[in-house]
Every structure is written in C-alpha cells, then in structure tokens.
Amino acid sequence: MNSSALLPLMVMLVQLWPYSLTMQNHSTQTTDQSFTAVRRVKRGWLWEPFFATEEQISLVPVYIGQLKSDLDKQDGNLKYVLTGEGAGNIFIIDEYNGKIYVAQKLDRERKPFYTLRAQAINRSTQLPVEPESEFIIKVRDVNDHEPQFLDGPYVATVPEMSPEGTSVIQVTATDGDDPSYGNSARLIYSLIQGQPYFSVEPKTGVIRMASQMDRETKDQYLVIIQAKDMVGQPGAFSATATVTINLSDINDNPPKFQQRLYYMSVSEEAPVGTTVGKVFAEDSDIGENAAMNYSIEGDGSDVFDIFTNNETQEGIILLKKTVDYESKRRYSIQAKVVNKYIDERFLKEGPFEDKTIVKINVEDADEPPVFTSENYVMEILEGAMSGSLVGVVTARDPDDDDSPVRYAIVQGMPLKRLFSINEHNGTIITTKPLDREIAPWHNITVTATETRNPEKISEANVYVQVLDVNDNAPEFPKYYETFVCENAVSGQLIQTISAVDQDDSVGGQHFYFSLSQEATNNSHFTVKDNQDNTAGIFTRKSGFKRQEQVFFYLPILIQDNETLPLTSTNTLTVTVCDCDTEVNTFYCRYGAFMYSLGLSTEALVAILACILILLVFFLAIVTIRQQKKKSPFSEKIEEFRENIVSYDDEGGGEEDTEAFDISALRTRTIIRTHKPRKKVTSEIHSLYRQSLQVGPDSAIFRQFISEKLEEANTDPTVPPYDSLQTYAFEGTGSLAGSLSSLSSNTSEADQNYDYLADWGHHFKQLAGMYTSHRSVGD
C-alpha cells in the first residue's frame, strides 16, 4: 500500500474518532438508565470504518462491512437492526450476522456520506443488548467527471517584443471529483496549439511568452490549452480551452518617406499660405506610436513651411513668403520627419527619423507693377501755390518684358481736387494751396497699371504732411466779459487775458501783450504782460461814472514770437457797473442791455404793465365771443322735450286746460293746396312681408326708406310730431313682431275712440280731442 492510499484512511479515522467517543458516552448513559437489570462486565460494538464506492453497478448487493457486538455468541440469538439515511433501500443489513450491503448505485458528488444508527436486540426478550450507536458510511470517489474551463474562451493582450517568460494569462479548470481522494481531481495543463511562441505551466495554467514576436508580422495568435485529470495518467478525462492572444503595439519602427525625392511647383503669384504640396512617411506602428512631426531644414526654410496633418499623418508644405520668378526660380529643401513618442529601448537600433529632398520650381506669371515702396511720406509747405511739387512715386513691371506703367490717384473727389499725378512719371503736384490749420495730413492712394495688361494693378499709399508757416496772428481764445465798479481804485486788476495761435511753433508759442499806441495816452486802463502768455488789465484812475460812460473799448495788441512775427488787434470791452467792490454780473449785464436800448428801468416797467393790461383785455373779449356763439336752438329743444314729458303725463282731466292745446296745431290759417296722401298701409304690409324674406340690406328696403323720406320732406300737411312714416320696418328675426301701428290692418279713421268717454271725467278732454279729430277727418 502506497502513501497515497494511506492518506485518505488516516483522514477517515480522524473523522470517525469523535463519533466513537460520542457512541461510548451514549452507551454508558443508556445502560445506566434503561438496562439496570442487565449486568455484564464488558460489552461494545466491534466494527471498522465503512466505505462504499460510487458508480458501482451490480445485480446483487455489494458487501461493504459488518457490525458485530462482543456479546454475540454466534448462536443466532441476537438481531441486528439498521436505521438512518438510506437504511432499508440503499443500505441493507443481515440481521443475523450484521453484514451491511449497498443495494443501489451511489454518487459521491451528490451525497458524499450517509449517517446511520445500529442496534442489537435479543430475540428472546426483544430487549436491546447493545445501545444504539451512530456511524457513517463514506462514499469513495471514482474518476467520473471531466475537467471544465468555466471562464473560457479567454482573451489576453501582451505588448509585442516582450521578452521570453513574460506572463500572458492564467487559465484555470475545475473537476467535480474528490480532490482529497486519489488523483481524480488532480489536473495538469498542456499546450496543444501555440508552439513555439507560447508555453504553459503544467500545474498552474499560466501561459508565458516563449519568444519575442513582432506585431507588424502577426498581431493575433490562437492558443489551445488542455487540462487532464488523474495527473495525465491513462484513462484520464480532459478538456480544452481557446485563448486569443493579441499583441499590442509599441514604437519599434521608425517612419520612412515613400520617396527619396519630391518635385513640386508654385506660381510667383501665389499668396502666403498657399499649399505647395504634400509629403508622406510611412510608419508600421499604429496609434500614437505612429504619430510624427515634419520640419524643414536647410535652404528655403524661411520661404516655405510644413505642418503635420494629424488625421492623415501627411506633411503639408505651405508658402511662408512670396516668391519671385525673376529673383529665384528653383528651391531645394530638406524635409525631416520624427516620431512624436520614442521608446528608448529601441534607440540602439537607430534614430526614429527620416529625411527626403523636395525640389520646388517657381512658375513665371504676369505680375502687376511693383512700387519702390509700399508707403511714401512727402512734405509740402502750407500756402504753396498751385502746381507745387509734392513728390514722385515710382513703379516698374517685374516681368521680363518690362511693360510701361500708368499712374493715377484713386482716392476721393476732394483729394483729387487738391492733388494731381503725372500718369507717365508719377510726379504728384498740388492743384490749389493747402492750409495746415484745416488738414495737417492728406492720405492718397496711387495706382500703377500695366499699359499692356490693364488688369494688372498695384497700389501704394502716399502720406502728405502739410508743413506749418506763420500765417495766423494770435488772438483772444474767447469773448471776455469785463466789468469795473464805479468806485474802483487805481491799479485794481479787473481782467486776466490770454491768447491762442493756430500756427504750430517749433520752439513753443510765446505772446506779447500791449495797448495800441493811440490808446496808451488817453486810456483809463493799462495792460501788464505777465510773460507767461497771459496779461492783466488794471485801472489807471480811481472812480468811474456810469452816467458819463458805460462802455470802454480797449485795443490790445498781441504779437507772436516767430522770425517774422504777426500782430493782431483785439478789442476788450469794459463795462462800468453800479457797485461798490463786488461785481454783480447779472445786474451789470442787465444794465448794459438797457443802456444799449436807451431805456431806463422805469420805462421798462411801464411797458411791461401795458402789455399785461392788453393781454387781460384780449382774454375778456375772447370769452364774451365764445358765450355769444352758444346755439339758440337749445332752448327750443328743452321746450320740446318738456312738452313731450307733459304729453306723456296722465294729466288733470277736464280741469287741466293749461297744459297744451292741440287744436292750435290743426288750425289752418294759411290755405294751401291739399295734396292727398297715399294709402301706404297696404304698401307697408307687402313691403314688410318682403323684408322678412330679404334683409335690411335689400334694395326694396332702401327704396322704401327713400320714398318715405321724400314724402316727409315735400308734404306740407305732415304734422311736426309725426315721424312714424320714416321707420316702417322693425327688422327681421324677432319673435315679438313689429310694434309699429303702420302694420295694423285698420286705418286711423277706422278706429273707434268712443270708449274714452267711459273712462271718467279725467279723460273727458282727451275723448273730446279724438272725437273732434275723427269728425274733421270725415
């Protein structure tokens, strides 16, 4: 028996030891309590551990062990009884000798052990001779399960060019057999597919690199791993798993230009930023390992530039500065490409860069004229006569044919009137004198056009500065209001003056102030120059009389400091005010204004009073006229409205004779030719019926209204209160019908008003009125 077979047996004995102790304790207690009548010196169960092998198939029960009591005399007097898990169906016992058999196939993975109880009974007395004891039947494992890879299929990634022994991934298989018994669950791993690039550790399932591999050669490998139980012995079960191993990229390849020499061309008319061409370097790596930067070295780096297109990894060559066919017709530049991210492990294999030559030819084009300068600055003195020379601009055709050039000014019309240019030689002259004080600078745009190709035009800016000359005399910067009190003392300062000059002095402006020669002797005031471009006006005497003179006019001379100085005379007006020491400006202005009008204060008050009286008189007249324009018909309207109200009143019967005499309206003091009225009752009925079918906008409605209006206007017999004939229609759609008496079938003459007499003496007068009206109608 080898050590591998003894190890499970020792483990089983350790597991059964507690059960043996428990059985003995339980036996002692039961004997003391239940079987005090039975006395023996030594008793106990005699058995060995029980094992049953799984997956056994037999037509007859298989013996697995025997229970035996030390009291058994082999005379058949004892009966063995088995109870517990599977007793009677899975496990059976021979009641005479205690042998146990297994009657069914067992599965250790479903149930690894069974717990049963045994008892020995005396057949004669049917009393137990041994206490009931518990024991375990263990199911012994056999290799009936295959290994399984529960996590497959596997995918792993490892950097390319990894050294040998680099761990890639670990695969693990499981086996449902008992790992504590035999080799059924002991697995061993092997490589079926993947040599010679990978290897696997037999016991752990760790897959490792067996050689360095280049992703650019092959970027994916399929590895098959096999797991066998029973340590790979014959008859073992096995399982396989697929592992997909991807090689990740590293920067182990430098970029390489596709061509060693590129040819490109660019027109001399091309503006800065024009794309000249593209270069491309290949890199076998991918992602950021293939990112690269392009640059230009050597001749032409100041004329051309290159940048990298990050999407296509192309080098785009751009025009950095305009080229000239006549100056240089060919450029040879060196383009360089370098990887952005370099792996220092591979620097020993060489630099991760490449170079190529790019030859660029400049193509000739018909260029516009070129000025000798893009901006010209010229000067001219202000006031120079018309036709004075300002300056000359020059342009030439850079092409080989050297076409003649025509010049012109293309600025606004005002500048055209100030300057002109000779179209053949570019000489600029003035057309009228210039004034620096109006405009110190003039900006002109001059064009040069090829005579052979007028479409070729170029421009240049000309800035003309107008130089200053001393042509403006200094003067007061503003109007000075100067006042002096009547009782001012001699030597009193009454005003400080200054001056301005529109000219521009190189050394700074300085002015000199003085009184004119004719005013120096007889003037009451003096001028003191402060030597700082200001001067003070002082009184030469004490006391002034307003009644004698209100205004004093001082002619003040102001001179500048130019080589040829200019002098101007400025008049300062001094007003005498009625004050002591402090000058009231408003009062002085008011007094000066009145003095200029020749009016005194009293006269002005009188004039204002007259104006106020005339204004009041005018308002009174307007108010009276508005009252007279009130309509006189308003009283008649009020009277008419009052009569209507009185007519609606019930009245006072016979005694009320003052209200209104209607007979006066029917008295005919003037004989007129009677024009009988039409019988319109039938017309109204027919038209009203038509109006129910047509509408208020019908022509019949408008015709009827027009006819009734004409009759009312021309019939002199119509009483003033009868207006019903104007409103013959009430409209359509009303369920209440018309309230007009015109739609009645009976005429006014057919109606009987005799019933009014039955209403009493209060309505006697009304009955008499309608009775008389009826008789008159007859």
Image (tube, rainbow, N blue to C red):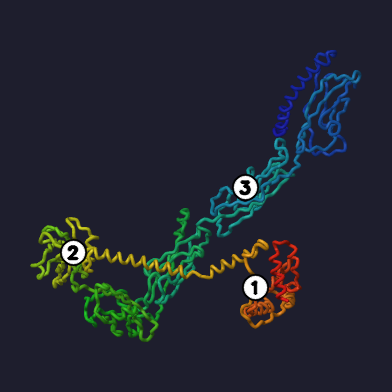
The location of residue 507, given as percent across then percent down, is: 17, 66
- Assign a secondary structure to mark 2: strand
- Residue 373: image quadrant is bottom left
- Assign a secondary structure to mark 3: strand
The location of residue 171, given as percent across then percent down, is: 64, 46
Q: Which mark is in front, 3 or 1?
A: 1
Q: Quadrant of the C terminus?
A: bottom right
- Left or right of 599? Residue 98 is right
Q: Which mark is residue 723?
A: 1
| Rendered position, 714 above or below 474 | below
The answer to whether residue 378 of the structure is visible from this angle is yes
Between 86 and 188, the one nearer to me in the picture: 86
Residue density around tag 1, few if under 14, some if 14–19, many if 20 or more, within 10 Å: few
- Assign a secondary structure to mark 1: loop
- Left or right of 774? Residue 56 is right
Q: Earlier in the sequence, mark 1 or mark 2?
A: 2
Tell me which amino acid carries mark 2: Thr
Q: Which mark is in front, 3 or 2?
A: 2
Between 715 and 523, the one nearer to me in the picture: 715
Disc 3 designates what residue? 200
Tell me which amino acid carries mark 3: Val
Label 1, label 2: how far apart the Cα atoms are: 85 Å
Tell me which amino acid carries mark 1: Ser
Q: Which mark is residue 575?
A: 2
The location of residue 630, given as percent across then percent down, is: 49, 69
Q: Are marks 1 and 2 in contact (CB under 8 Å)?
A: no
Q: Earlier in the sequence, mark 3 or mark 2?
A: 3
The location of residue 66, given as percent across then percent down, is: 83, 27
Q: Which mark is in front, 1 or 2?
A: 1
Q: Are marks 3 and 1 in contact (CB under 8 Å)?
A: no
Q: Earlier in the sequence, mark 3 or mark 1?
A: 3
